Image (cartoon, rainbow, N blue to C red):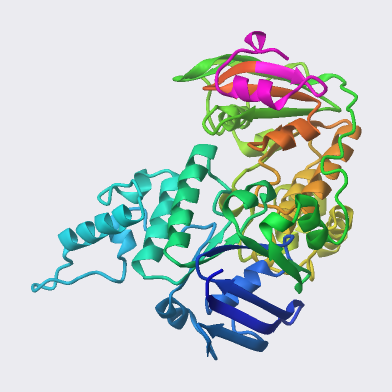
Amino acid sequence: MGECILEVKNITKVFPEAVALSDVSMQFRGGEVHALLGENGAGKSTLIKILCGAYLPTEGQIFMEGQELPKLNVKKAQALGIVAIHQELNLIPGLTVAENVFLGKEKIGVLGMVDKRYTIRKTKELFERFKIDLDPTAVVSNLSVAQQQIVEIGKALQMESKVVILDEPTDVLTDKETVVLFDIIRELKAAGKALIYISHRLDELPEICDTFSVLRDGHYMGSGNIGDCTKADIIRLMIGRDLSEQYPYVPGKPGDVVLNIHDVKRKNFGDKVQLEARSGEVLGLYGLVGSGRTELMKCILGIEKPESGEFILNGSHFEAKSVSKAHKAGIYYLTEDRKKEGIVTNTPVDFNMTLPSLQEIQNGFILSNKKEQKLCSSMVKQLSVKTPSLKYEIQQLSGGNQQKVLIAKALITKPKLLILDEPTRGIDVGTKRDIYQIINELKASGVAVIVISSELPEIMGISDRIVVFHDGVITGEFAHNEATEEAITLCAFGTKKESVAV
């Protein structure tokens, strides 16, 4: 076990509306990957912001290599080598990899110009040292999300960081990209850096993490070695109870066909697709990133246009030329990108809930604040949204509660067909189960639910039927009771179901 590099003692953070952290103490050691765990709203983000100097603690102390850091600010934290790589990447798309890595740290030549050759050379040396396979001259906008994340890591390495905080680093990565990221983390660990690793994917922790600490409702619940605990032990610390049934599956009662996708083909993508979604069931769509699941759903909404085929909604031809037309027809799509396409930042919870359904809160031509408050209060109670008030800015809520607000927004439109794209991405296990219960209630009420997910256990756990995509082609369809991980995975890699032993 390495030396303690960073330590927090008795940290408390009080906001006007809530106590975010209460008497929290932790140590982070060099050469160690320390998992910081907890449900959404447990206080992880607040603690990270304190470590990075964005927030001052109300009470408590921070120590770096034994020296107390009073009144820590962002600039001082970076100078000391505390770097956070957040879910929302902080890169300039139009610049190259090298320019982003050395942004603000450029070498200026004799004529007052940036020495680009120096920047490229130093970036190449840095990447070779940590076995990063990335072209320093590549423009960031042309890189995949995984590659952009590696650029962020490069920025942290260039700063000679001592503490690297990774916030949900595998959230949007494929399995292959995750392997690359883990190799880089191991190089950082071998270099003696202290790594703080935040993730809701508990299954990946034993592979990359050494130790863990758990927060619950702002309180420190305990720490330990990853190898000494089971997943159930950690979940019990996180939520205060056993999670005996992670996927509370209730068999659906399929009714009429709500949506019929008939011979739909996207240009330069796969083959003709035939698909049905019925009332009272959950249809799960599974496939690797780029398999065409989301793209097909966006064709229904009119966001993308198919080359051929048609959509039949409740027995009649349907062509959505806009998202609002789809809403009026009873179709609602909940985006996978909550931050960019879901919430409206800097606006309150009630505004986000009612934005597509203003007719529900009108008195004639005037919006009724009373109707809005009554409707939103009902949804907050129904979905167990944790928010200090309806006027609280949505961006200040945890990711899980933001997602519940977006589900509430969808439900207020009274959809007949609800499409949920990665509905539990970046959400803790307790909130995931809440969302699965909501899905069960929706299908019991006769709504047709389509769930797109990259998490195979989730798709298998909540779906009545599972359709697997590969390169825009449906390679298999499975009933709930016949689906196996092996069969679905084979189909996801292009093997047709008829060639798979089920």
Kindly tell me whether residue 214 is visible in this rendering: no
The image quadrant where one finds the C terminus is top right
How far from the left and from the top, in percent, is residue 292?
Answer: 55, 27
Please identify the residue farthest to the front as the structure is shown.
Answer: 1
Q: Is residue 185 left or right of residue 117?
A: right
Q: Nearer the viewer, residue 40 or 141?
A: 40
Residue 4: name its quadrant.
bottom right
Is 247 magenta? The answer is no
Q: Which residue occupies 72% across, 50% down?
A: 406
In the depicted structure, whether residue 91 falls above or below residue 302:
below
Q: Nearer the viewer, residue 181 or 385?
A: 181
Kindly tell me whether residue 469 is visible in this rendering: yes
Q: Nearer the viewer, residue 252 or 77?
A: 77
- The magenta stretch is 476-502
In the depicted structure, whether residue 106 falls above or below residue 365:
below
How far from the left and from the top, in percent, is residue 13?
Answer: 69, 82
